[in-house]
Amino acid sequence: MDFLKSAVASAIAKGPPFPYTFGDKVDLDPSIWALYNGTRREDGSNCSIFSFDITANRSALPLARNALKKLRTLRHPGVIKVLDTVESDSYIYIATERLVPLRWHVKRKSLSPETTKWGLYSIGRTIKFINDEASSIHGSLKVASIFTSESGEWKLGGFEVLSNVKDDDAVIYTYGSLVPDSGRYTPPELARSGWDAIKRSPHSAVDSFGFGLLVFEVFNGSYSGTDQAGQTKNIPPSMHSSYKRLANANPKARLSVGHFLDQGLRSGSFFDTPLIKLTDGVENLGVKTESEREEFLDDLGQLSDDFPEDFFKMKVLPELLKSVEFGGGGPKAFAVVMKISAKLSNDDFDTRVTPVLIRLFGNPDRANRVCLLDNLPLMIDRLSQKVVNDKIFPQIVTGFTDIAPVVREQTLKSVLTLINKLSDRTINGELLRYLAKTANDEQPGIRTNTTICLGKIAKNLGPSSRVKVLLAAFSRSLRDPFVHARNAALLALAVTGEYFSDEDCATRVLPAICPLLVDKEKQIRDQAAKTIEVYFQKVRKAAAAMPDSALPPESTSPGVPRMSTPQPGQQGQSGQPASSSASWAGWAISSFTNKLSAAAGDIESSNGAAASAPSATANKRQVPTVVPASSSASTLHRQALKSPPLGSASAPLSRTSSSGGFGGESFFPDPEVVDDDGDAWGDMDDGTGEADDFFGDANDTPTSPQTNSLSSSTTLPSKKSSAAPAVPFDDSSEPDFAGWLAAQAQKKSGGLGGKGLPKGLSKASTTAAAPAKKPLPVAVFKPKTQPVAAKKLDMKPKQTDEDDGWGDGW
């Protein structure tokens, strides 16, 4: 092979220029030609090269020259297309379109019956043209003389003895017997009387007999001799009678190829097939009338999947694309385009279909746009991401604002197909802007589909904008008057819960869904309950994983116990479990007193001594004061400042509580009636006295760190005991803070509403304040009038408005 290529190259170098490059040699039946695959040097396009070596086969030179001459002059769609020829003293080269011997397909039996009929019809038309219009005889019609092009069409070659019957010196009479393998295919009359017998019979008789043998060979795979002529094995039944007349031994009784075609084209006959009709009509599809085009496309749509792929790719597809783009082929033509495109390779699709698709998406015709969007799922996998994102999507988005609702809806549906081919920037920018418009469309169906679309593409949205977009869109749809829009929003929320944080679920999603639990439509109510259950489960799971409290642990002085928070099921002094409401109230009041304790602290003086108001030392000398259960927070705090410490000699403790003192009898004596804000709590007594006891015990907690919690071993005074006598402050250790308060209250009686001292620090008052429901005596501590001999602190308060409301903020 290498030697042959070098010989060919050297021969070309010595002869005229030949702008083609030889490739691999192609196997052929016995022939005077050698066939090579080749390429055109100018553009690299494929071609085939027939080569004849004159020096090696000079006796067949007249046949080679006759073939060269006929191929140059005979022009027909069914004849091999010649690109270029070169003849020298040593060789003849004929460059043609890329060809494949039909023998290859026959041996592999790769031809379907419909494709075989279509090929025979094409060769039959070519033979008819040669016999009738050209008044010639092919003389060598067989499988070896036929090739298939890149489009799958059958092309006729083998023109070595093609002759005009009007030429007395025609090559066929002299050299007909020199054609390789001519003995098997020679008609009986020529085998008996020689090639001059052609003149005594109709000139079409030779080609009719050869065409009959061709029919037998392509359906059976081989032909061995004249004894098989006329046999109907594997030949379609509808073709039997006509085929037998082609292979008749009597040349005058043979049916001409032209008549064979006419019989085959009759309605319901063997050549009356959609594929053959397509072949006849595809080239002039653009000039057909609308009715003719509709009929043609209907037949085209009936084609099965066994059509010749190459022919549709090379011939039918370009014509259909032209019809769709310029000739008004419409959806039917485009449906056939998609059917053919499914058989193309990715490279062929990019080369032949993609450029046309880009132009079609730019076409403003609405019918074309809807057709393209309907078929988008069939082509999207064949389009590159760059083409979709940069060239097709910018054309598609014009449909979002089209005045035709059907265009807007189809454009919206196409988002699900396009989403995987779009960049993140396009999705979170341009696409979301257009979806925001369709979410407010006047058509309820478009609004509903927008909600569904957002639910399906949620995973493609950017994390920074996903939650904001979905919450806004779904919340709006939940209020949509269209029932299906609300249902779509609920379904979308049910499947997108993973994208919302626990806080969003609890504070934004669930409140938006709850109104639909009482929707007028049962369908919506049922779906709302299902969706809420999804979010409830998520919120419950998140709550179970949360810590009991996010507050930092409060620091306490070493050895100083803290007041514990009553827990559900905790027993009071009576030994009975506290109620759930009491437990909640106990928790609330305990937190309140804890805050008071946290606010109390030591103020560092200039000399380093600690001064507090009230200090721990002062609290040790206070006597407990009982306040009513309905006392306000400010009163509780003020009375706590002048209560004696637990364990004082003047405060007898007669009872021991092991439960912390909540829910049992109060250890403070009953106070006197004071002007207080008790009505702000309301009547908490439920008839059992538990409320009074609960809030009274909890609120009477002192504010100093030492009295902020109760030891389990503390003995509590009986509620029935009398008020303990007042214990004066020790002048040698603490300032007269209560006396200072009384003096300030007298000076600024207007700042406290004209009541003199702050609430809880005055004597028994007989003012016109609303009396409590059950007036009770209050033990008031009278400050000593003796001056403090020890150190004195400047306790003069700043002249601000804060003193007027001291304690009222609690």
Image: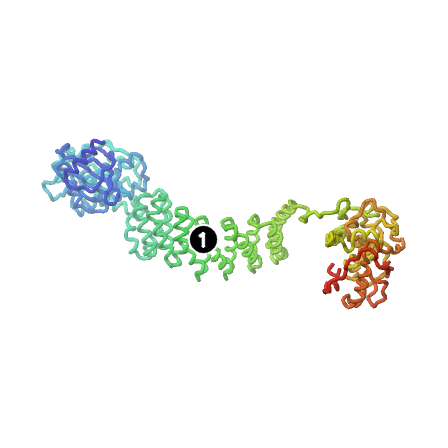
| Amino acid on which the number 1 mark rests in the picture | Thr
Residue sitting at x 68%, y 49%: 551
* Number of marks: 1
Task: Determine the image quadrant of residue 507.
Answer: bottom right
Q: Is residue 493 left or right of residue 331?
A: right
Q: Residue 23 at x, y = what percent?
A: 24, 37
Q: Is residue 752 above or below residue 545?
A: below
Tell me the element at label 1. helix
Q: Pointer 1: residues within 10 angstroms few (<14), some, or many (20+)?
A: some
Label 1: which residue?
426
Q: Is residue 800 left or right of residue 156?
A: right
Q: Is residue 411 above or below residue 114?
A: below
Q: Is residue 724 left or right of residue 591?
A: right
Front residue (pair 335, 446): 446
Q: Looking at this rendering, what residue extends furthest in the left direction?
A: 169
Q: Residue 156 at x, y = what percent?
A: 22, 41
Q: Residue 412 at x, y = what percent?
A: 46, 55
Residue sitting at x 56%, y 48%: 498
Q: Residue 433 at x, y = what percent?
A: 48, 57
Task: Determine the image quadrant of residue 726.
Answer: bottom right
